[in-house]
Image: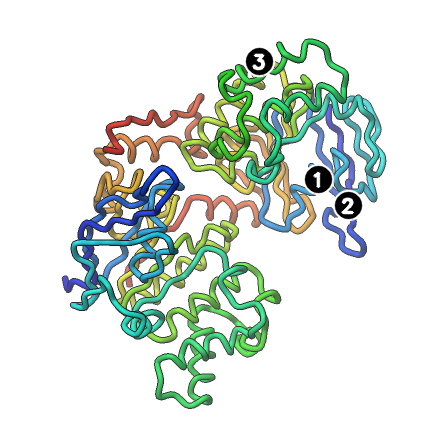
Amino acid sequence: MTELLKVEDLRITFPTRQGPREAVRGVSFTLGRERLGVVGESGSGKSQTGRALMGLTPPPGVATARTLSFDGQDLRGAGKRQWRALRGRRIAMVMQDPKYSLNPVMTVGRQISEALGRVGGLSSREKRAKALAMLEAVMIRDPERVYDSYPHELSGGMGQRAMIAMMLAPDPDLLIADEPTSALDVTVRIEVLRIMDRLVSERGMGLIFISHDLKLVSQFCDRVLVMYAGRVVEELAAADLASAQHPYTRGLMRCTPDLDHDLRPLPTLRRDAEWAK
Amino acid sequence: MIEVEDLEVAFGRVKAVRGVSLSVPEGESFGIVGESGSGKSTVLRAICGLAPISGGRVRVAGEELRKTARSAGFHRSVQMVFQDPYGSLHPRHTVDRVLSEPLAIHRFDDREGRIRRVLEAVGLGPGFRFRYPHQLSGGQRQRVAIARALILEPKILLLDEPTSALDASIQAEVLNLLDDLRARRGLTYLMVSHDLAVVAHMCDRLLVMSQGLEVETLTREALRRRAATQDYTRRLLAASEGYPAQETP
């Protein structure tokens, strides 16, 4: 397996009144052209990890790492120019809610063309044709109409597909999806995942899928990192999730209600101070 | 306890709820499931007077409800818990103030004792009494919201997605708390959620809604047997199983 991304000892620190606080404390993993799930509850540092890979750690936060390399390039201390060459072209990100991540005053088509423009070397007619083809690839039935629509004219599922189309249009090598379906209805969620799955496998991309939903991640990804309090507490193949070792992973698996089993009271998670160490 | 017949709710020309009927006997827990825009929350809001009843009949504990006006007695027996514990608590009021206000409005005696007991009942010790919402976690805030609803000793709780803003492990704790409170106090619940598994866990019967219309009413057992009669419910059931293992080409 070719190594696309290598992260060693990633730490993200935010200054607080009580002194610096580490939101991510020494995360290491490698990614090939596969689907990697990152699971954890709010505050576990999963989103911050994703953002750091794009160089988007919000100031005053600071991300440091022993190794942070993407396709052989060292990203530690990368300058604006180096990031610009990567973001959107080689590394793309899909955020949680299309309502906030699409530009509300620009039509979807113009936004996709803009993303394509960053690749360079395309005439505006070619950009339009490629944008329409991308919209078709995300199973939008009437790409012409969506092309000329503003984000508020689209439903959540449609908006998220447009977002995926925009992110995948420049053919990136790595897609980071941060809770891409959490704002969507369950019936729409499956469709959007299927589209993402197909495009990622067809184009041989690496995918980092960040989610709080352990069950969904285990069904969708090849490998899962479970994060707790800024650390990876367990890394395992998605198929082996049932035989997870760490009590946090097991607790997380059991605490969601399940249609077929009537467990009352629901098993709750007993947190152990040891896990955070 | 709650009787809803052909309820319609219109906001201007838009009909958010178009003829929904349900009936919840005392002590039962009834669920409403649907996707965004199905009108499920609007049904709850119409019952407690936050949305106008523009057609049909709603009776709660024998009292016939009009458009939006509700009596003080109604609010004492019916309370609501909202989805977002970050938005539903006043950021500059302490827990103590949040809990004393309804007591003052309804002229309850023994306010000290009531506040102490209700904090105990929702699993927050007396140490939380003088904290502000920003000093609490999401789960603790939702416990305060539940305490606020319970302090008037209502008979009915309207629960609007009470756990969807919470992490899975916290959701389990809050669901257990709600389950336990209902058993101990004989409460009647009307609960709205987009999550079939949560509703199936909490409710004996449930109504599936879509686009302001009722799709069907199912018992928990029927849901477990996947005995849905409508296509929409079947799709919802299939979707809540998660991402289907793909047929590798």
Circle nearer the N terminus (1, 3):
1
Circle nearer the N terminus (3, 2):
2
Report crowding for label 2: few under 14, some 14 to 19, many 20 or more residues within 10 A (C-alpha).
many
Percent across and percent down for residue B72 are 80, 24
Q: Dot 1: what SS? A: helix
Q: Dot 2: what SS? A: strand
Chain letter of disc 3 in the image:
B
Q: Residue furthest left?
A: A1
Q: Dot 3: what SS? A: helix
**Residue marked by disc 2:** B9
Chain letter of disc 1 in the image:
B
Q: Amino acid at mark 1?
A: Val
Q: On the rendered structure, is A257 left or right of B227?
A: left
Chain letter of disc 2 in the image:
B
Q: Amino acid at mark 2?
A: Val
Percent across and percent down for residue A130 are 42, 81
Q: Is residue A209 above or below residue A137?
A: above
Q: Is residue A105 visible?
A: yes
How far is mark 3 from mark 2, CA to CA? 39 Å
Q: Are labels 2 and 1 assigned to the same chain?
A: yes
Circle nearer the N terminus (2, 1):
2
Q: Is residue B210 above or below residue B21?
A: below
Report crowding for label 1: few under 14, some 14 to 19, many 20 or more residues within 10 A (C-alpha).
many
Select label 1 or label 3 by which is in front.
3
Q: Are marks 2 and 1 in contact (CB under 8 Å)?
A: yes
Q: Are marks 3 and 2 in contact (CB under 8 Å)?
A: no
**Residue marked by disc 1:** B43
Percent across and percent down for residue A117 are 40, 81
Q: Is residue B127 above or below residue A254?
A: above
